[in-house]
Image: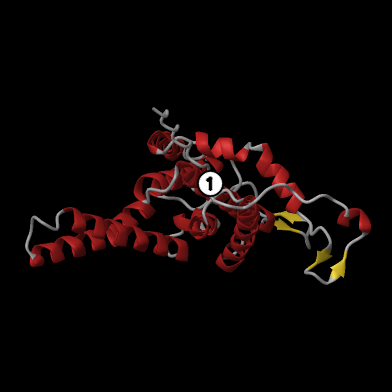
Amino acid sequence: MANFTTHIAAGTIVSGSLATLTLAADVIAPENLIPVTLAGVLGSVLPDIDLKESRPSRAMFAGLAIFFSFAVLFSVADRYSIAELWLLWLGTLVLVRYGLHAIFHNMAVHRGTWHSIIAGLFSAAATAVVFGNVLERHAGVAWLAAGFMLIGFLVHLALDEIYAVDVADRRLKNSFGTALKLFDRRHPYATAGMAAALALAVWLAPSPNAFVSGLSSRDMWAGLSADLLPRERWFGIVKLPSLVAETPPASRDITTGTIPQDAPEPAAPSP
């Protein structure tokens, strides 16, 4: 399989390319672009969470521990003394980082359920839940982050399959076919649990209508097509053939950077 460095490098390249298109399409505000892009990079290493001592696994459970410990702290800050708050915060931190980590890895199998497309779909829906309900971002931004997460996740699975092909010896390694799969047939209970988690995440996530509407916008795709190549010169230096130079400029102005704009309130009738 591909190593951590390869996965994160590929994820960064793919997510960066998608972020460039997103920026050019002007579909989200600039301050949302970085967290959305990071969701794609995270997705490119997330399947290896089922490796107990892997960096993605340690980083994810450390992040969850920090998130939940402060969530508990802030939710009961006005009920207990400072000493009790310290104990609650530290207990939650240790419980999630080490207890939940141990329970998860006693149940998880490498190249099992987490190396499947259904796990990628769950991760994408969970990303939409976090962006929409926890970070309180626009529903369109939440599902865009989910899309980045899913693409990064699939890039990881595809790389693992590519590395399972031994080109020199013209053979397939034993690991071929264990990464890029719809679901894990070897562990039906784990697959059923992942399917249930996916259904729950989709139910909790904000509506994807804004994202679908923005993605299907003809104006957006027309703008991207017009901006794909420079109209006259590359970097202002290399002149392009006259055919390209004569292409009319796109009638699109980058203004708001939102996905999508809320409909304006109707003006009150004049008396």
Which image quadrant for residue 89? Answer: bottom left
Q: Position of residue 83 (x, y in %)?
A: 9, 67
Q: Furthest-right residue in view?
A: 242
- Whether residue 80 sits left or right of residue 203 in the image: it is left
Q: How many marks?
A: 1
Q: Tell which of 97 and 177 is nearer to you.
A: 97
Instruction: For mark 1, give the secondary structure.
Output: helix
Q: Is residue 54 visible?
A: no
Read off the residue under disc 1. 144
In the image, what residue occupies the spot 72% across and 47% down? 251
In the image, what residue occupies the spot 74% across and 53% down? 227
In the image, what residue occupies the spot 84% across and 61% down? 232
Which image quadrant for residue 62? Answer: bottom left
- Whether residue 203 sits left or right of residue 173 in the image: it is left
Q: Tell which of 107 and 98 is nearer to you.
A: 98
Q: Position of residue 252 (x, y in %)?
A: 68, 48
Q: Position of residue 196 (x, y in %)?
A: 40, 34
At label 1, the amino acid type is: Leu
Q: Furthest-bottom residue in view?
A: 237
Q: How is the image coloured?
A: secondary structure
Which image quadrant for residue 202? Answer: top left
Crowding at dot 1, Cα within 10 Å, few <14 / some 14-19 / many 20+, comes out as many
Q: Quadrant of the C terminus?
A: top left
Q: Tell which of 67 and 212 is nearer to you.
A: 212
Residue 266 vertical placement versus 22 (above, below): above
Q: Position of residue 16 (x, y in %)?
A: 62, 60
Q: Quadrant of the N terminus?
A: bottom right
